[in-house]
Image (cartoon, rainbow, N blue to C red):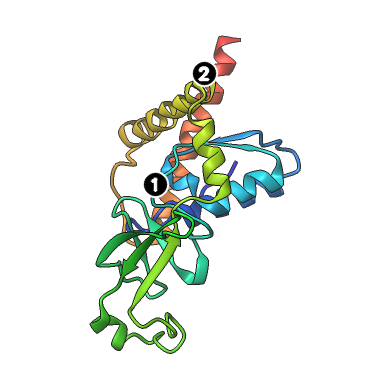
Amino acid sequence: MAAFTTSGEVGDAIPGQKVLQDILKNKNIKLTEVIGDTAYSDQPFLEMARDNDFEILTTPHPNLGTGIAGRDGFTFNKDADKFICPNGQLAISKRIVTYKRDHSKRAIYRFDPNLCATCPLKETCLRNAKEKTFSVSILSTEHQKLLQNNQDPEYQRRRKERYKIERLNAHLKGRYAFRKAQCIGISMMTHQAAIAMFLYNMQKIYTLTDKK
């Protein structure tokens, strides 16, 4: 199918989109559904599913909103529950604002002004902001639909199949020495990942063939 190796501090959103894009380019594969964690409730994933006629099975994160991942170079780290700026700095705080006009909510993330003052991107990043903050709407129309889907028992049942992914991850770590890096560098980690997945697939093919 497709795989993408990143360093440990990178969130799931951008690499996940790249993997899906690679899969969608393969005309021999008909993608019908994608199961993922809250990172896959990001707006670009939902738009990709809508445009390519497949379904996202995930739980919406309450802080994810319209056009967040990749917007203006900012990416969301779901584990820290904060944004990372284009220069790689993590936001230092977050607050939720509710507007009286339409009762909409926005999450506002603030970055360290001292780091922003010496950042090489300061002339183009957040240049019009009085404070070094980045904000996103909490729920888009797609997210509202996703919330509705998550109330459906059948949708919940299908979404729970995600445990199989975690089980496979644990299998790769335990059986194929993928728990820690054997060498230094992203290139070597990519090779290690490819070898682990190749060995797993070979064993799977052998097992299925042997049963026949």
In-front residue for pair 28/45: 45
Which disc is residue 207 wearing? Answer: 2
Q: Is residue 124 left or right of residue 108?
A: right
Question: Which residue is at a point 34% across and 41% down the rendered structure image?
Answer: 178
Q: Compared with residue 83, is residue 62 higher up or lower down, i.e. above or below?
A: above
Q: Amino acid at mark 1?
A: Pro
Q: Badge 1, how many Cα within 10 Å: few under 14, some, many 20+?
A: some
For numbered disc 1, what is the local secondary structure? Answer: loop
Q: Compared with residue 88, is residue 101 higher up or lower down, i.e. above or below?
A: above
Q: Is residue 198 left or right of residue 26?
A: left
Q: Amino acid at mark 2?
A: Thr
Q: Position of residue 181 (x, y in %)?
A: 30, 51
Q: How many marks?
A: 2
Q: Earlier in the sequence, mark 2 or mark 1?
A: 1
Q: Position of residue 197 (x, y in %)?
A: 47, 39
Which disc is residue 205 wearing? Answer: none
Q: Say if residue 19 shows up in the picture.
A: no
Q: Position of residue 1 (x, y in %)?
A: 60, 41
Which disc is residue 62 wearing? Answer: 1
User: Which image quadrant for residue 183?
Assistant: bottom left
In-front residue for pair 75/135: 135
Question: Which residue is at a point 44% across and 25% down the rendered structure image?
Answer: 160
Q: CA distance from mark 2 to mark 1?
A: 42 Å
Question: Which residue is at a point 45% across and 43% down the rendered structure image?
Answer: 195
Residue lying at the far top of the rendered structure:
212
